[in-house]
């Protein structure tokens, strides 16, 4: 791991956006596959302490996705959405809804930039209100995302597994 | 038609939202059906001068939608997206993308409020950038939307057809 591989989150005041950038030491094709293959996504998305159970992860236009995360105390958190656009090795656009906050939907776009063996993963999320955005930022998303990216690097052989 | 049935569009400066409200003199179940039935949507959505050709309008979670509008000069405009959520007689959440501006996606939510024989139709749209929002507002969306609502009222027998 180099110091370049740091998660940067931008959430400007007064606009309902969250942007993140994270670089990983793995080729773009490998990174992309880890986002669209259900057998891979379940191995890295989210914090280590969460047990992920996938109901669907159908990464094509109109495909649905849904999963639950179970924490060590047995609390279950459900998430769901649909894929709007899937461009191989370039970008994925999908909706996102947390079952605990129904009716509040966000639109996520992740783009993959080929840095020559390395990949820059950028996300841009828009929320339906400023309150929804602020709630997400206040939920501790940063820690969970960074842990997910570290697991992704381990999965792709770009990082030693955590002991 | 009463003076209550006026389209109101709100687009505040500095936030990437567009909100609209329009009341129609028709029961909520009829209005809802006109939004989800492909045989009906094609009869009212958009300006009169446009010839609408529907490729898909599959109003269920993960369903896709796409259509083209052809103007009198033969210019064709394509639109597409997916349905994220469909709650009968209450709300529909879907993505929206104009083929002429690919990669720029918005998230639309329309809600139907039962006013007792009348219906209040409210839309809330979020864009991926302020520029996208401003571009949509500047595109003359107001005229096309109001004409569509008038056609909807005609279709539902709540208004005399335009001669």
Image: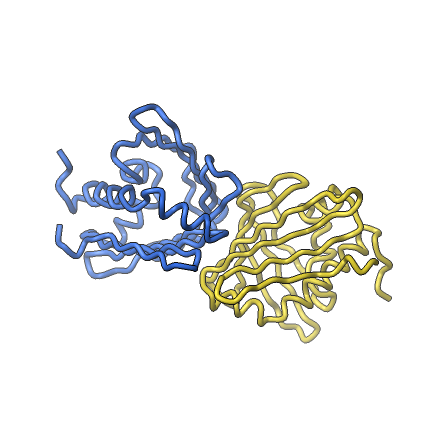
Chain colours: A blue, B yellow
Query: Which quadrant of the figure has residue B143?
Result: bottom right
B134 left or right, relative to B21: left
In percent of width and height, residue A117 lies at: 19, 57
- Taking the image as shown, residue A29 lies to the left or right of residue B69, namely left
x, y percent for residue B35: 68, 49
Residue B151: quarter of image: bottom right
Q: Which residue is drawn at the image coordinates 48% and 38% (left, top)?
A: A101
- Quadrant for the C terminus of chain A in the image: top left
Total tally of numbered discs in the picture: 0
Nearer the observer, B61 or A49: A49
Residue that appears at 87% across and 59% down = B160
- Give coordinates of residue A125: x percent, y percent: 40, 53
Q: Look at the picture and state if A125 lies above or below B11.
A: above
Question: In the rendering, at what x and y percent does residue B57 appear?
Answer: 62, 49
In this view, the residue in front, B37 or B135, is B135
Residue at the limit of the structure toward the bottom, as seen here: B73
Q: Is residue B130 above or below residue A37?
A: below
Q: Residue at x 78, y 57 (%)?
A: B4
> In front: B50, or A149?
A149
Q: Nearer the viewer, residue A94 or A11?
A: A11
């Amino acid at each position: 791991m180099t110091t370049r591989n740091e998660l940067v989150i931008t959430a400007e005041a007064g606009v309902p956006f969250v942007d993140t950038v994270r670089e990983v030491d793995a080729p773009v094709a490998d990174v992309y596959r880890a986002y669209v293959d259900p057998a891979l996504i379940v191995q890295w998305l989210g914090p280590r302490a969460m047990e992920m159970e996938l109901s669907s992860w159908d990464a094509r236009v109109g495909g649905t996705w849904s999963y639950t995360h179970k924490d060590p105390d047995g609390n279950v958190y459900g998430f769901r959405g649909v894929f709007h656009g899937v461009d191989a090795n370039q970008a994925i656009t999908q909706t996102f809804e947390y079952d605990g906050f129904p009716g509040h939907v966000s639109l996520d776009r992740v783009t993959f930039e080929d840095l020559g063996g390395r990949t820059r993963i950028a996300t841009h999320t828009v929320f339906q209100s400023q309150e929804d955005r602020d709630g997400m930022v206040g939920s501790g998303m940063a820690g969970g995302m960074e842990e997910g990216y570290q697991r992704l690097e381990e999965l792709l052989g770009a990082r030693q597994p955590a002991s």
